[in-house]
Image: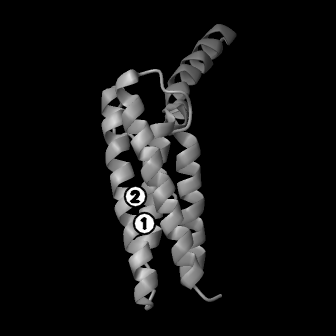
Amino acid sequence: MTSKIRLALLGAMAALALPIAAQAQWWSQHPGYLHALSDLRSAYWLIQHRGANDPAQANEENHALGEIRAAYGELQKASIVDGKNIYDQPPPDFAWGDHGGRLHRALDLLRKAHDEIGAEEDNPAARGLRNRATGHIDAAGRWTAAALQFWHF
């Protein structure tokens, strides 16, 4: 094979490989809302799959779940207003562990979601939705932290 043909083949292979490589982490190019939606889904799962027998702790966790649902709904609306595909999200970040460990991980994810949507919003129609979502995320964090007080390590 001549060097020109090899060079052309290598160039063609590189051109074909670029879209595949770019798609490997497609979510890294999406705005914070989509990352936050994924983090909220993970936090919800971690709190929902509990082994708590303490009714007071279950109450705190149920409040946290309600706040996460509300924040998720607000972020979905904000994503739609921004013209983003709400189904185009990074995979959820699940962590396994004991109940207290899962609540700590959920709290970390809620903090991360708060930070991810904290950037300046240039779409005025989405600002109110983002602000309400932030309030719900913060409330979910407070309820989750309160549930942790009941967990005996």
Closer-to-camera residue (37/71): 71
Which amino acid does the dot numbered 1 rest on?
A: Ala
Q: In which quarter of the image is residue 79?
A: top left
Marks 1 and 2 in Cβ contact (< 8 Å): yes
Up the image or down, 56 lies above or below 109; here it is below
Which residue is label 2 attached to? 68
Q: Is residue 105 left or right of residue 82?
A: right
Q: Quadrant of the C terminus?
A: bottom right
Numbered circles on residues, count: 2
Q: Position of residue 30 (x, y in %)?
A: 48, 33
Closer-to-camera residue (138/38): 138
Q: Is mark 2 on a helix, strand or loop?
A: helix
Mark 2 is surrounded, within 10 Å at the Cα level, by few (under 14), some (14 to 19) or many (20 or more) other residues, namely many
State the residue at coordinates (33%, 41%).
76
Q: Which mark is residue 64?
A: 1
Q: Is residue 92 at all visible to an observer of this figure? A: no
Q: Where is residue 80 in the image (x, y as percent from the top left)?
A: 30, 32
Which amino acid does the dot numbered 2 rest on?
A: Ile
Q: Position of residue 133 (x, y in %)?
A: 41, 45
Q: Is residue 22 at all visible to an observer of this figure? A: yes
State the residue at coordinates (43%, 84%).
56
State the residue at coordinates (60%, 16%).
11
Q: Quadrant of residue 86?
A: top left
State the residue at coordinates (34%, 57%).
69
